[in-house]
Amino acid sequence: MMNQADELQFDEKGLLPAIIQDAFSQQVLMLGWMSRESYELTRSTGLVHFWSRSRQRLWKKGETSGNFMQVVEIIADCDRDALLVRVLRKGPACHTGMITCFHNPVDKEDGK
């Protein structure tokens, strides 16, 4: 894990995209946004925390569903403006009950 939030490049709103990946299956589970505070909480507790852009507040993944995500590893990309968070998940990642939030194929028109 990285030692300092200061090394990360948060955007103008103070957020950083965090791709959440299952540590065993390698499946991409979801994309969330981390503020400096949610990043620090994630590091200190070992459970994934996000900043909710719609509710404008911190939230711990699983706080209402019980589907917590335990951090295995946090990796920054080359520009340090995005994170890959590898996790052990308890239950589905998506609020719809699906394992991953990425379950809606987008078909190309006219077979192109």
Image: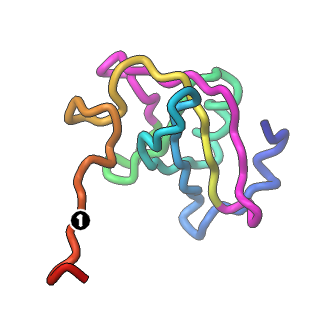
Q: Which residue sits at x=54%, y=64%?
A: 13
Q: Which residue sits at x=54%, y=55%?
A: 17
Left or right: residue 1 compared with residue 97: right
Q: Which residue sits at x=56%, y=22%?
A: 70
Give the residue type at disc 1: Val
The N terminus lies in quadrant: top right
Whether the magenta-drawn stretch holds residue 78 is answered as yes
> Quick one: 3 or 93, which is closer to the camera?
93
Left or right: residue 107 compared with residue 91: left
Q: Give the residue at the far front of this rendering.
A: 111
Q: Position of residue 5 (x, y in %)?
A: 76, 47
Q: Which residues are magenta?
A: 59-81
The residue carrying mark 1 is: 106
Q: Position of residue 58 (x, y in %)?
A: 47, 38
Left or right: residue 101 compared with residue 110: right
Whether the magenta-drawn stretch holds residue 76 is answered as yes
> Quick one: 24 or 29, which is closer to the camera?
24
SS at mark 1 in the image: loop
Q: Position of residue 92 (x, y in %)?
A: 33, 26
> How has the structure been colored for display?
rainbow
Q: Position of residue 87 (x, y in %)?
A: 56, 29
